[in-house]
Image (spheres, grey):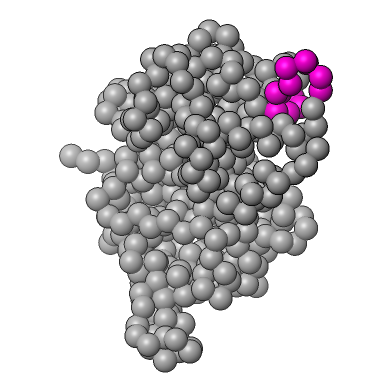
Amino acid sequence: MKKKISILVVDDDSAHRIMLKTLLETWGYAVFEADDGSTAFEKVKQKAFDLILMDIKMLKVSGIEALDMIKNFNPSIPVIIMTAYSSVETAVKALKKGAYDYITKPLDFDKLKITIKKAAEHAYLKTENQALKKRIAESFDHQNIIGKSEAMIKLMEAAAQIAYSEADVLITGESGTGKELIGNVIHYNGSRKNNPFIKINCAAIPETLLEAELFGYVKGSFTGAIKDKKGVFLLANRGAIFLDELGEMPLIMQAKLLRVIQERETTPIGGEKSYSVDVRIISATNKNLLSLIKKGEFREDLYYRLNVVEIKAPSLKKREGDIPLLTRHFLKTFNKKNKKSIKGITPEAMDMLIKYNWPGNVRELMNAIERGVVLSSGDYMDKSSFSWLNSGAGDERQTSNIQNNDKKNISLKEAEKRIIIKTLEACGDNKTKAAKLLRITRKTLNSKLNYKN
């Protein structure tokens, strides 16, 4: 028989506490009571509760003080704070101290039920036995993420635990570290994997269109709205949304997103009817959101809503041991794409790749291997296949390490020009293909070719 989830209700208002106890018991939970923060702490020391539902304002020991004591004793217990609308700022403080979530009074029972369900599932994940974790790890689909370094093993272990929860996730890391791939891993290994997973790039969509994309609109709500359109929150209902480049979201959109998360319902632009939504949010950013909060460019309350669980994508510098694995994978991929049959890479060239700084991380390595495949004519890629990389020690990036035949130093522009000429030769003088390979526009390519010494 499945064990009932135990909830400790902490409230010095006896009538409110009894009402909550009755309600929660009808939902199938085992409910215990405490009339003060200090009493709650004593009960936590005596029994391992699955979840705590605690009022923030109590006469003797407040919810904030009790939260500190409880989290110091047992950080894994999820605590949901109850607060009045006028004390939301204090609730945000509670989130910073480790509260799982907060809900405002008067309580919306539907929201309370969903919040408790998510917190209980999160608690279940925390207390899983080791045998179950091992089975999860053995069946975990890495979704083409390649790596056996310690940093990647830790990342995959964290992703495996997070995937089976319902918690919203914030993925942080430098550009090119594979944050979207990590988002894929989390979603497609979770309970929502058979439901929609819709991706939105907050930096690529203008502010005026981003609201329409997220929330939808009704016919006639603005010029060009010739028919009703569902937003991604409705389209992804019971699934998940991936918000890429979260740090680029305008403040006004942050406020609207926060409302949807809090209310768990969305209203199309120009519409009057609201729709309930059940969506997991997986976000990603290469920016320091805490720094943006200090500058007033990102909402603190939204940050703590979305950052229920944070996972950090390691830079390539922290996983050098994965470079040979990644190189072989990309070589196989781009051999097929470019109809080449390069057998491998020389030890000297591999050493060059391992020592290089890789400011663009895995994405830059992938581009370098593709370019190397195109420029190589022999059976193996050697150092000349990556002549534009700085193979020396140190962190300074060098656009080109090419020298002319008499070993005389050349300018940066001349080095770029030589790379372009060599790439053009490899592409049969096809400027469009060469520009695409070099990740520049055809106009830029022509401009650099017309450079005169």
Q: Which residues are magenta?
A: 395-409
Q: Quadrant of the C terminus?
A: top right
Query: Nearest the camera: 135 or 414?
Result: 414
Quadrant housing residue 92 = bottom right
x and y, in percent, of residue 180 in the image: 46, 44
Which residue is painted at 34% across and 85% down in the image? 227
Query: Nearest the camera: 197 or 440?
Result: 440
How many tags in the picture?
0
Which residue is painted at 48% across and 36% down in the image? 427
Which residue is painted at 36% across and 45% down in the image? 187
In-image side of 184 versus 14 (left or right): left
In-image side of 155 versus 128 (left or right): right
Tell me if residue 191 can be seen: yes
In-image side of 208 versus 33 (left or right): right
x and y, in percent, of residue 357 in the image: 67, 25
Q: Is residue 295 above or below residue 159?
A: below
Residue 202 part of the magenta-drawn span:
no
x and y, in percent, of residue 385 in the image: 55, 21
Q: Dominant secondary structure of the magenta stretch?
A: loop
Q: Quadrant of the N terminus?
A: top left
Quadrant housing residue 320 = top right
Residue extending furthest top? 347
Query: Nearest the camera: 132 or 394?
Result: 394
